[in-house]
Amino acid sequence: MRTLDTLLYALDGVRERKFRFALNIIGILIGGAAITSLLAITQGVNRDVSEQMELLGPTTIAVTPGGFGYGGKGFLTMKDMERVRRIPHVEVATPIISMSATVVIGGRTGIVSIVGVVPEEYLQVIKNIEVAEGRFIRRGDMAAAVLGANIAQPPGEEEPIVDVGSRIAVTIKTEEGIKKATYRVAGILKETGGAFIISPDDVIYISLRAAQQLFDMGNRIHRIAVEADAIENVEYVVEAIEDELGEGVLVISAGFVRETVGRITTSLQVLLGGVAAISLIVAGIGIVNTMTISVMERTREIGILKAVGAKNRDVLLIFLSEALITGLLGGVLGVLSGIFLGQVISSIAQLTYNIVLSPYITPTICFTVILFSSITGVLSGLYPAWRAANLNPVEALRYE
Amino acid sequence: MTEIIRAEGLVKEYIQGGRPVRALDGVDLAVEEGEFLAIMGPSGSGKSTLLHILGALDRPTEGRILIRGVDLSRLSDVELAELRNREIGFVFQFFNLIPRMDALSNVELPLAIAGIPREERRRRAIELLKLVGLGDRMTHRPSELSGGEQQRVAIARALANDPSIILCDEPTGNLDSKTGEEVIGLMKELNLKSGKTFIIVTHDPAVAQMTERILYLHDGRIVGEKRREMP
Ligand SMILES: Nc1ncnc2c1ncn2[C@@H]1O[C@H](COP(=O)(O)OP(=O)(O)O)[C@@H](O)[C@H]1O
Ligand SMILES: [Mg+2]
């Protein structure tokens, strides 16, 4: 029998048992959709992180107080910064102060990160900052602020809620009580799509000195952004900083983050993929079951096929094709549902946890899911197809 | 005339309830090409078993069958399947058509198994259905056809690969006598026109009357033979 005829015959066979076929397809579809969406989401996380790392550049290193207060110091000092600056292969080391404050902008109130930086140094490290309107802050500015794109025009707004030249009011709570300050908007930034540690789109920049004064920081700072002179020296610089500042700090390079996230997402993929794969196995068992019943119901048909000259191999391939069609169709529908499911999961994550997940469907994911679904189908069909192929034709024709 | 089928000492045993049962108990048989032969015998005498073995659908426990001098016991299962496909056509009491497929597709089945391309298959199936008088029923499913019509479809299917031997197991057993006679008449016509060999297992003396030779089977043995000159 020709391959095409075998497939057409198999297709005719499944059409006759639409309901059962549909149930099997749904089984495979659920497994396929689960795998697709989970792979797409982890893949998306990986991609987002990698993209952010690209923005940052491979030579950037962030130094933060280790453990974010849990056993760590919680702060670094200007002195730490000076020590880092003296390490060989460090091109730039610049201090950052970053704290939340209640801010009134254009009549709206919200909690926003206020970031104090040394402008010319900071811009050497974070290279993707561009001014849309006005200017960036200057070293000596004490009353000027520059707004990230999402601050000036929150997502969903048609127009900016604030202009260059207008004023914003900042309120913070300190141990001594409420403290207020007013800044003039000196500039508004273009959207950057994010960066390492701090997302320029979602913060308000002021000068380091203004931040020290506002938050009463004295000598303390929150972070040091470091730029090494060459990629091959990044590892050396990371280790030198760790040696210099001791265990209490966390030194992170773009490569380190990418690697860590890659490891986490890979193990997540294996774990979640494994869980989802179980649903495929369950679907496979369902196929074994229903196909075995089908073979029994179709005993006479198999007898007829053999009487008119079908070989065992022809019968085997007919039933395997049915299983393959089930797996393949289930897989294709599973991928399509998985794409949809990924969107649903990311919307839910966004709404309930405010986590932005952007599922990333690659051709490899689609291909893998369809391949595994098809393999599941064929493996599940092996036993029933083997039974069908080996039916004794005389017995099969007697069968009522 | 050339001998097309020869059976020597055919024995077929089944195990039933732990005991061997002899369905065939030493059958010798020779059939000439182009014969129109009936096998008669009471129920359980081994007629179907004999037909299945002659048609390469089953293997005997003992003895051998030669078709055109080829010893079937020397053929593999695959070769037997090919032989059934090309050299033998079966017609059954219960028609054994595939219910979900229309008349054309049923007739095309042996052709598809032989790997014949689609258009040729269709052309040949149309030709055969016209030959058995079903030119206007080709896209009907078995459930939409009368018993006589279904049996004609089955005959067309048996003829699909132009085999030289047609084996019929009580082909009129499920038809009224008039329709049965028409079906046997069609077979006789095909036999005369194309020289195909027909072996018809039957209960029905009226059917046997239309053949040239009758073999009587009893308890798995051939117990008698009657020859008649055909008009
Ligand atoms: N598969 C089988 N297993 C056991 N016994 C069988 C089987 N097939 C046929 N027989 C027995 O063989 C004998 C002949 O059966 P069969 O060839 O069908 O007779 P007929 O067609 O003449 O009615 C019967 O006794 C039947 O019970
Ligand atoms: Mg019988």
Image: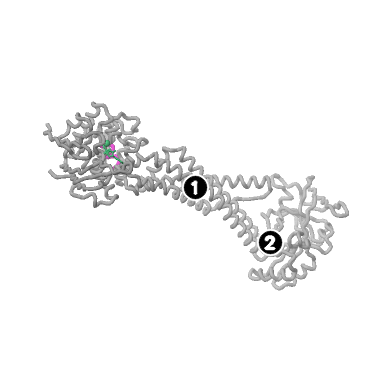
Kindly report the distance in space between the C-alpha atoms of the residues bearing marks 1 and 2: 44 Å
Side of A211 where A259 appears, left or right = left
Per the image, is B181 magenta?
A: no
Identify the mark nearer the N-term, 1 or 2: 2
Residue A101 location in percent, x, y?
80, 52
Checking the image for residue A374, the label placed there is: none
Residue A174 location in percent, x, y?
85, 54
Side of A213 where A307 appears, left or right = left
**Image vertical order of residue A246 relative to residue A45, above or below:** below
Figure quadrant of residue A131: bottom right
Query: Is circle 1 on the same chain as circle 2?
Result: yes
Question: Hey, what amino acid is under mark 2?
Answer: Lys
Residue at the disc numbered 1: A331
Figure quadrant of residue A204: bottom right
Q: Are marks 1 and 2 in contact (CB under 8 Å)?
A: no
Q: Residues within 10 Å of mark 1 (few under 14, many from 20)?
A: many
Q: Secondary structure at mark 1?
A: helix
**Chain of the residue that carries numbered disc 1 in the rendered image:** A
Q: Out of A206 and B193, give the one closest to the viewer.
A: B193
Q: Out of A259 and B65, give the one closest to the viewer.
A: B65
Q: How would you classify the magenta stretch by its main secondary structure?
A: helix
**Chain of the residue that carries numbered disc 2 in the rendered image:** A
Residue at the disc numbered 2: A127
Q: Secondary structure at mark 2?
A: loop
Per the image, is B125 magenta?
A: yes
Question: Hey, what amino acid is under mark 1?
Answer: Gly
Residue A124 can be seen in this image: no
